[in-house]
Amino acid sequence: MKLGGARKSLVLLLCLALSCGSLTGCRYSSVDEYLEQLGMKEPEYHDEFAASDSASTESTYVISQDTSISDQQFGQTYAEAESSQIPAYDFETILDEVGIQDSEHADAVFSSSYKNITPDELDADMKEGREKVGLNAETIAARKEQQKGLYAYERLTESGKTLYVEILTIIENLGENILVSTTSDDAIDLVFDYVLADHPELFYVDGYHYTNYTIDNVITKIAFTGNYLYSAQEINRRQTKINNYVNQCLEGAPSSEDDYFAIKYVYEYLIRNTEYDVDAPDNQNICSVFINGRSVCSGYSKAMQYILNKLGIQCSLVTGTVTTKKSSGVRHAWNLVLCNNTYYYVDVTWGDSSYQTGNGENADSTKLPAVNYDYLCVTTEEILKNHTISDRISMPECTSMKDNYYVREDEYFTTTELELVKDLFERRYADGSENVIIKCDSRYVYDVLFELLVTQRKVFEYMQGDNATVSYTTFADTYTIIFWL
């Protein structure tokens, strides 16, 4: 008999640094220089994944009507993004569009390791263990039916789906040393990840261990045990608190058949009720958000997934890495959502200004929006500007802009027409906004609007009241300009 090693689930976190500057003699090359001048230090965090620095290349400046500004550097050529209409799909069509064949399922390589477990091959202890957690042919079939439509689950072979519901059932019942239907350690490793990707409610497990049963050094059986963080009593206590938070959140959820409004509501709700904190307890699960109100990316994304699933909106966990101002390859977690039958990416962590300001340590946090919408319902092309998607679970190509935040809120600029800028400023003054956000569809539009509004100071033509100066914030990698009213 051979004992397998314990395996920890991914710990994903980030922190943000911003580059700030002023045209009145207050310019810094980086946030490090800025914070060093202020006597501030970025929080240190030691984990199996390194902390990151900045969600995107961001700068805040102040311009006046009579102070010169250096010209923008324009590129040689620009490609206008094409807008295409993506039809609405039902779920079966969506799976067909992904085009996964049996040979392409993530666990197909383990097909030979899967086995049907029959009562005759189980000794008394093994049979009792499976019966205790409720594993038999009937319950497995029923549980597989319940999992239909879950993103990671649907990417497994039928045998892989059986292993999936076995692991899920064992974890839900805090089972120990329960026989599962594979002889492959690697199959367990993969399918365990898939279970956690679909089930944010499993906040009480962070890994597993297993026992290999061998004959002549050949594995004949494997027994699975979850690495449980809390007792059953503590799990119930925490679940009660989670339910209270979630129910309060759901009370204010919009009643609409349009998924966009619910997704936007949860995005904003989590951001406004959560502080980014690398030292938050339980920051790899939903307890950090729902009980403590402080978390990192793993907690944010699992909380988003949990609530949207309660609202009947398919939301999956996505893992990968991000590129920040000072580092690359930093591990991170965000979400894939199915909004009105079309897939989009959502990164609620990078939408939180408390993340952007490095856990509250920023010299001018007032020049950041409380909610950054650059990561609400975005395409694959947009997310890949600073995110790299792990190949652990295959993800769809998200191409639609139909339910992107800026498109839905009429803040998306595909042209450099200043009349549209004027209209946007008037609307934001009318609704009492503290800023005007201009999201551009290409570098060309971004550069031209920057040239016109900032370098040539045409922005003052749209400002109301007596304004000698105006502050603005730019996110260069997402082509976003924010003017502060």
Image: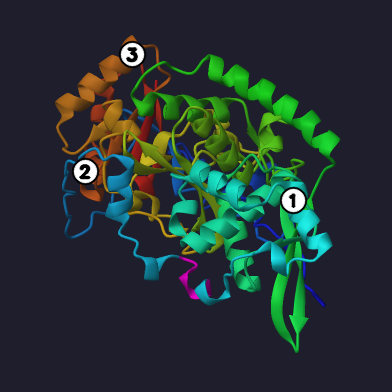
Rendered view: 426 above or below 61: above
Q: Which amino acid type is marked by label 2?
A: Val
The amino acid type of the residue labelled 1 equals Glu
Assign a secondary structure to mark 3: helix
User: Mark 2 sits on what residue?
Assistant: 445
State whether residue 49 is above or below residue 445: below
Going 28% across and 23% down the picture, which residue do you hit? 460
Q: Which residues are magenta?
A: 106-110
Q: Which mark is residue 429?
A: 3
From this view, report whether residue 429 is shown above or below residue 446. Answer: above
Q: Quadrant of residue 387?
A: bottom left
Q: Are marks 1 and 3 in contact (CB under 8 Å)?
A: no
Q: Percent from the top left, x then y, of residue 55? A: 50, 48
**Of callouts 1 and 3, the N-terminal one:** 1
Q: Secondary structure at mark 2?
A: helix
In the picture provided, is 179 more to the left or to the right than 68? right
Residue drawn at 56 percent across, 42 percent down:
301
Q: Give the CA separation, mark 1 to mark 3.
A: 65 Å
